[in-house]
Amino acid sequence: MENNSCTPKIINYDGKEYICSLAFALRLIGDKYKSLILFHLKDGEMRSGELQKSIAGLSNRMFTFSVRALENDLLVSREVYPEVPPHVVYKLTESGKAIIPIILELDEWGKAFAKDHHLYAPCE
């Protein structure tokens, strides 16, 4: 193991200091709904209602909170079309697209873990 005498770099973001880059990354995508929103946008843009309905158990309040946080963190962009009723579309930014391979790996890991530990419900 190489001895690195470099002092850890502190990440200053949104009024907080992060000494650990993993803690910072988890701050951006770590909650349940943020990761799922990113996952569901992996194949392209989605209308607001369609995106919200694609995630089981996601309330309107949590959807709004999560998608606004992703937008503020520059992982998702929002476009509003001035129609009646308004047409809102969400899509991944370049930074959002960059996290997708990692989210897909987590998805595969979850499937393998569930299979290895016999956690899947039997087929009827």
Image (cartoon, helix red, strand yellow):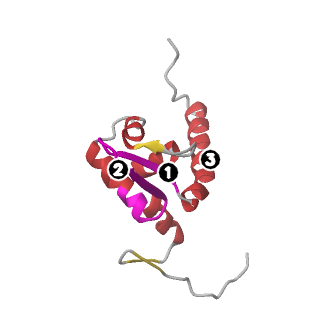
Q: Which residue is mark 1?
A: 91
Q: Magenta segment: does it hold 72?
A: yes
x and y percent of residue 61 in the render? 26, 48
Front residue of 36 and 124? 36
Q: State the image coordinates of residue 124 (x, y, percent, origin top left).
A: 50, 11
* Depth order, front residue of 116/15: 15
Q: Within 10 angstroms of label 2, few (less than 14), some, or many (20 or more) residues? A: few
Q: Earlier in the sequence, mark 3 or mark 2?
A: 2
Find residue 20 and report its horizontal and vertical position in percent: 51, 73
The magenta segment is 68-92
Are discs 1 and 3 less than 8 Å apart at CB? no
Position of 3 with respect to 55 (left or right) is right
Q: Is residue 90 left or right of residue 100?
A: left
Residue situated in front as seen by the camera: 30 or 45: 45
Please tell me whether residue 78 is drawn above or below residue 4 in the rendered image. above
Q: Amino acid at mark 3?
A: Glu
Q: Earlier in the sequence, mark 1 or mark 3?
A: 1
Mark 1 vs mark 3, CA separation in Å: 20 Å
Residue type (three-letter) at the residue carrying disc 2: Pro
Task: Read off the residue under disc 2.
Answer: 82
**Upstream in sequence: badge 1 or badge 2:** 2
Amino acid type at circle 1 is: Lys
Is label 2 in a helix, a strand or a loop?
loop
The residue carrying pointer 1 sits among few (fewer than 14), some (14 to 19) or many (20 or more) residues within 10 Å by Cα, namely many
Could you tell me how far apart the alpha carbons at marks 3 and 2 are, in whole angstroms?
38 Å
